[in-house]
Image (tube, grey):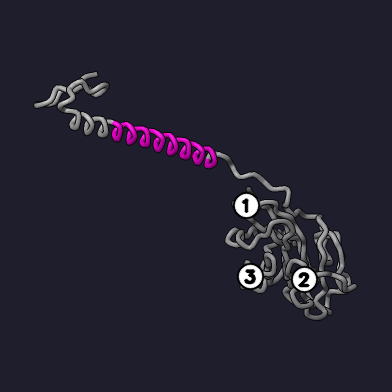
Amino acid sequence: MKLFLRDCDCVYFPCRNLRSKGKCGVISALLRLLSTMAFALFVSITYMHSTHAASMSDMEKPPTRSNTNINEGNEWIYFKGTQKPPFKWNYPGFREGDKKWIKGRTGVGYSMDNLRSILDDMRGNYSTVYARREFSVNDPSRVKKITVSLVCDGPFIIYVNGIEAIRSHDKRVANRLPNNTPQAIQLDISGFIDELLIGANILSIQCSNTDVNDKSFTFIPEMVVLH
């Protein structure tokens, strides 16, 4: 292809007008620069398109339930509140070697029908149960949401790896159906995803009754982790 200048008739490949060799060199360099810029623009647009497509693909994927969920009927380790629990009882790495720590399946309580672990010594003696449950997370960066479903008659505090995530402010928390069955409340603790560790984690809950002499008590915790 020929390129004509006002005072120089030169050809880009090759430059046949030797007297205009300098100007042809300028034109050649300019065209090489334009070619390089066009290629860089093409690469940039291609990368942006592929990145956008990948992000859109991720957005279209619905969150999936993790196999780390904690369900009603799972086994917890709990401590009767006849005294304060040991130091850092709600942290990973704590060893429940003391015989005062009991293994039991939820629900926990007394004088209700939906219980698997009966606290027949609770009424009149203590009003609080301290419970912990280990769960595993392979990749915390993939966790999108954590929700806790909790039945607790009175005040409660929920911890993630020893860090307080949420607590109640009302003495009586659980709503009850006409047959006196307590209803669970749903709690979003996704703000504490950054506290998750790779591997073993601990969900701990301090659950109290409304009164030490209350006629019944129910504690049923569940957790759902969405990826």
Disc 2 on helix, strand or loop?
A: strand
Q: Residue at x 67, y 46 (%)?
A: 65
- Residue contact at pointers 2 and 1, CB within 8 angstroms: no
Residue 197 position by quadrant: bottom right
Find the residue positioned furthest to the right: 99
Q: Residue at x 62, y 52 (%)?
A: 143
Q: Position of residue 93 (x, y in %)?
A: 77, 67
Q: Point out the tag, 1 or 3, that comes first from the N-terminus.
A: 1
Q: Is residue 156 above or below residue 124?
A: above
Q: Which residues are magenta?
A: 32-59
The disc placed on residue 143 is: 1
Which mark lies nearer to you, 2 or 3?
2
Magenta stretch contains residue 146: no
Cα distance in 3D space between marks 1 and 3: 25 Å
Q: Residues within 10 Å of mark 1 (few under 14, many from 20)?
A: many
Q: Amino acid at mark 1?
A: Val
Q: Which residue is mark 2?
A: 130
Q: Residues within 10 Å of mark 2 (few under 14, many from 20)?
A: many
Q: Position of residue 210 (x, y in %)?
A: 72, 74
Viewer-proximal residue, 220 or 193? 193
For this view, does 100 lie left or right of residue 70?
Answer: right
Which mark lies nearer to you, 1 or 3?
1
For this view, does 191 lie left or right of residue 114?
Answer: left
- Residue contact at pointers 2 and 3, CB within 8 angstroms: no
Q: Which residue is mark 3?
A: 168
